[in-house]
Image (cartoon, coloured by chain):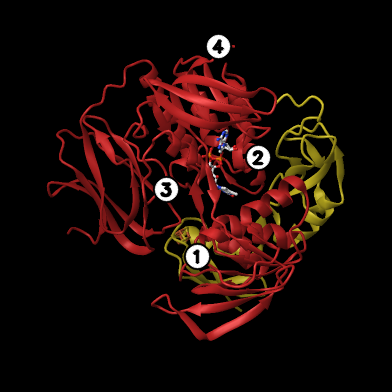
Chain colours: A red, B yellow
């Protein structure tokens, strides 16, 4: 096989799959997906619950069903699929993008591509990323690891479980384990509001009478060989521990659901600059990173809560990657995008003259009755009212086509400032 | 009796206060739109959920097959359905959409496969 290819897609999860479909529709041939696992689909096969695809397919699918639909679509294209193949290095040299692959059958291989789409997804924060004092016994794992164990391998992580963090994966696992007869003692969340979707609070915790300890954290872990209990402490308004308000709960397993981080070791090797807030690459309106020809989409770019948006973003990235390969991507001077009041992160950081752009952002904290503004030289270019904004729900809007080069500020404020 | 439940129809998540007696709704308040009323009635009188779980499968590329009920079922039947699925044992290959058990636990819904599991020998991809 010729190792000089058109487009390399790194990662065969929903982002990579959607990118491959769009490249095919755009008439781009010689597209290759590299996936380190044995099957395509990414993290979706372990997400056996339903609630996927409502937006995109207008019906409620489970994670595996969503994945199967896209895999079937990709199988109908002429995309080359390399499973059991990890990309271990990526760099740009004289216009060419070079990928170093490690395959279980082929061993080491080197490919060059005209464009690369990063679709490596994210990984979970673990105990090393947060700070819990106490001993280091067995029985502490991330919620996603437990999800894989139960749903793909078929065994239970323990009999008595506590979950730290109220992110969606932790909530989903609370229900999954309860249904399997495991005693879920509670979910402990440091913030005064839950990290996951309301629907999951209702259907995963309330349905099973699992307590949610908001404004609480785990202050100590006990156990010699295996964890046997944890100490839980209330947190006051200043985010300081309230030592008078503290109790201990027994458990044999602690699941961590304390957030996801885009998987960008490879991007950094390629010289891609990362955004401090998203931990994903800095991208322009074309989903192109700071390295020409390298595009990013899905959870490697920023953590999404709804997979439908991952697929849409990947389609956008693939459309511009196709233009790049066809040498019709000619955007030059960009308009800078600035994140203002109550915006935790926003992307892209740059949009182009004369083109409407989808902007994605997350608020810092929950607020009711607030207005999202995009302003330029004091003039409103976009405005939308929200009855409620939540950090757990990403917001997307279409910024209209603009001219000139003055920056645009996006922020939340009360009605008309 | 008074129950406080959270409406999950839209992201606003209103707290609904539902007064009910002998399986009849007396009043619902706290909703910001009328969809909350329908949700509150359904949740108190006849709460339903789609159940998703796994079934053991032999000879496949993975040892577990993900499954779901073909329609929402009575909430009270969830545990029984999951327990019943955990007793089953299948053989690969299984195709997505295959009915694993009709009218599972007399719930009115079928248990169906939500993925393909190829045989371990012919696992091309
Ligand atoms: C544990 C976990 C559980 C989740 N549960 C839910 C949920 O219940 N509901 C929900 O809506 N969202 C959930 N999410 C979010 C979900 O990940 C996204 O909605 C979606 O799957 C992201 O798609 P993606 O293609 O960007 O990433 P992924 O699905 O993570 O796919 C990335 C793929 O890239 C591959 N890869 C990575 N690095 C390399 C490399 N160097 N070489 C080759 N291949 C590589 C990986 O093996 C993987 O298959 C979960 C995320 C995680 C981590
Ligand atoms: S009552 Fe209406 S506004 Fe409130 S959460 Fe339900 S659907 Fe949304």
- Classify A94 as above or below A90: above
Going from N to C along the chain, the mark reached first, 3 or 1, is 1
Q: Quadrant of residue A220?
A: bottom right
Circle 2 is placed at which residue position? A64
Give SS at disc 2: helix
Residue A102 location in percent, x, y? Answer: 61, 29
Going from N to C along the chain, the mark reached first, 1 or 4, is 4
Q: CA distance from mark 1 to mark 2?
A: 26 Å
Residue B41 location in percent, x, y? Answer: 58, 64
Residue A124 location in percent, x, y? Answer: 55, 52
Q: Residue furthest bottom?
A: A244
Circle 3 is placed at which residue position? A279
Chain under numbered label 3: A
Give SS at disc 1: loop
Is residue A164 or residue A196 the one in the foreground? A164
Going from N to C along the chain, the mark reached first, 4 or 2, is 4
Q: Tell me the mark number nearer the camera, choosing from 3 and 1.
A: 3
Q: Mark 4 touching mark 2, by CB under 8 A? A: no
């Amino acid at each position: 096989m010729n190792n000089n290819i058109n487009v390399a897609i790194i990662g065969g999860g929903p982002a990579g799959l959607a990118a491959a479909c769009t490249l095919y529709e755009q008439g781009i041939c010689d597209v290759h997906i590299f996936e380190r696992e044995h099957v395509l689909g990414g993290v979706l096969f372990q997400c056996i619950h339903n609630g996927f695809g409502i937006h995109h397919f207008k019906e409620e699918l489970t994670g595996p069903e969503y994945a199967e639909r896209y895999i079937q679509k990709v199988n109908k294209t002429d995309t080359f699929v390399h499973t059991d193949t990890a990309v271990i290095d990526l760099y740009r040299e004289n216009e060419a993008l070079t990928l170093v692959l490690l395959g279980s059958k082929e061993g080491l291989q080197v490919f060059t591509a005209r464009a690369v789409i990063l679709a490596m997804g994210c990984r979970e924060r673990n105990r090393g990323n947060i700070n819990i004092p106490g001993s280091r016994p067995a029985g502490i794992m991330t919620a996603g690891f437990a999800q894989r164990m139960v749903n793909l391998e078929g065994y239970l992580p323990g009999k008595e479980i506590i979950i730290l963090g109220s992110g969606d994966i932790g909530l989903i696992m609370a229900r999954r384990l309860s249904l399997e007869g495991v005693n879920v003692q509670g979910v402990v969340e440091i913030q005064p509001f839950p990290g996951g979707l309301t629907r999951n609070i209702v259907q995963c915790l309330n349905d099973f009478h699992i307590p949610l300890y908001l404004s609480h954290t785990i202050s100590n872990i006990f156990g010699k060989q295996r964890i046997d209990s944890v100490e839980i402490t209330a947190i006051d308004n200043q985010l300081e521990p309230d030592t008078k308000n503290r109790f201990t709960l027994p458990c044999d397993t602690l699941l961590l659901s304390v957030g996801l981080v885009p998987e960008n070791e490879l991007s950094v090797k390629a010289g891609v600059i990362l955004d401090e807030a998203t931990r994903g690459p800095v991208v322009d309106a074309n989903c192109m990173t700071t390295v020409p020809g390298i595009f990013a989409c899905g959870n490697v770019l920023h953590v999404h809560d709804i997979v439908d948006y991952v697929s849409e973003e990947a389609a956008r990235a693939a459309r511009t990657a196709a233009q790049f390969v066809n040498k019709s991507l000619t955007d030059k001077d960009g308009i800078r995008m600035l994140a203002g009041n109550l915006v935790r992160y926003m992307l892209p950081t740059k949009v182009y003259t004369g083109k409407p752009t989808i902007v994605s952002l997350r608020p810092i904290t929950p607020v009711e009755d607030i207005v999202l503004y995009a302003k330029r030289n004091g003039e409103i270019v976009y405005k939308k009212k929200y009855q409620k904004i939540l950090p757990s729900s990403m917001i997307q809007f279409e910024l209209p086509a603009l001219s000139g080069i003055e920056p645009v500020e996006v922020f939340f404020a009360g009605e008309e400032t | 009796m008074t129950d406080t439940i959270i409406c999950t129809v839209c992201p606003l998540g209103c707290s609904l206060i539902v007064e009910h007696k002998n399986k009849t709704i007396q009043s619902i308040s706290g909703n910001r739109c009328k969809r909350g009323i329908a949700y509150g009635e359904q949740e108190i009188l006849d709460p339903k959920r789609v159940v998703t779980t796994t079934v053991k499968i032999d000879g496949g590329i993975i040892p577990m097959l993900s499954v779901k009920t073909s329609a929402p079922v009575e909430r009270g039947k969830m545990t029984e359905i999951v327990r019943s699925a955990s007793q089953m044992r299948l053989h690969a290959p299984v195709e997505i959409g295959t009915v694993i058990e009709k009218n599972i636990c007399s719930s009115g819904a079928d248990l169906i496969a939500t993925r393909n599991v190829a045989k371990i020998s012919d696992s091309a991809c």
